[in-house]
Image: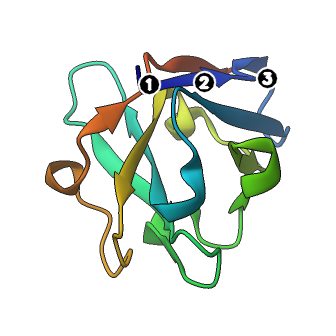
Amino acid sequence: QLQLVESGGGLVQPGGSLRLFCAASGFTLDNYAIGWFRQAPGKEREGISCINSSGTSTNYLNSVKGRFTISRDNAKNTAYLQMNSLEPEDTAIYYCAAQPFLSCLHVLRSDFTSWGQGAQVTVSS
């Protein structure tokens, strides 16, 4: 059974860093694009980053460009989201999602059919 599990969330002070992990089981990520999304209280879930299956193409939400980095290690069946210079506005539940053969020209919730359960990220002093 295809499963995605996020980890690495937590509480961090403004300006701090966190690294999120997205581990896949029940399938191999080799042919799947990975997207990272987040949903803050009272807000819609928004796409923040995407990486294609080979890792050669990435896309970022403007507000996280230069602060967040998406990557993947297909040998470990895991994707990552490195988050630096975190701001209180980054507080949200973060989700990873997978979809086969996606180009990552956009980061759209509707493009992804497999989702993890989410990881809470709280940025607060």
Q: Position of residue 113 (x, y in %)?
A: 23, 41
Label 3 CA crowd tier, 10 Å (few <14, some 14–19, many 20+) = some
The quadrant of the rendering that contains the N terminus is: top left
The residue positioned 46% from the left and 72% from the top of the image is 62
State the image quarter where residue 10 is shown.
top right
Q: Is residue 83 left or right of residue 1?
A: right
Q: Vertical placement of 30 versus 14: above or below?
A: below
Label 3 to label 2, Cα distance in Å?
A: 17 Å
The residue positioned 47% from the left and 20% from the top of the image is 118
Looking at this view, name the residue that lies furthest to the right: 16
Label 3 to label 1, Cα distance in Å?
A: 22 Å
Label 2 CA crowd tier, 10 Å (few <14, some 14–19, many 20+) = many
C-beta proximity under 8 Å, tags 2 and 1:
yes
The residue positioned 33% from the left and 82% from the top of the image is 105
Residue bearing mark 2: 6
Q: Position of residue 115 (x, y in %)?
A: 36, 31
Residue bearing mark 1: 116
Q: Is residue 103 left or right of residue 8?
A: left
Q: Is any part of residue 125 visible from this angle?
A: no
Residue bearing mark 3: 12
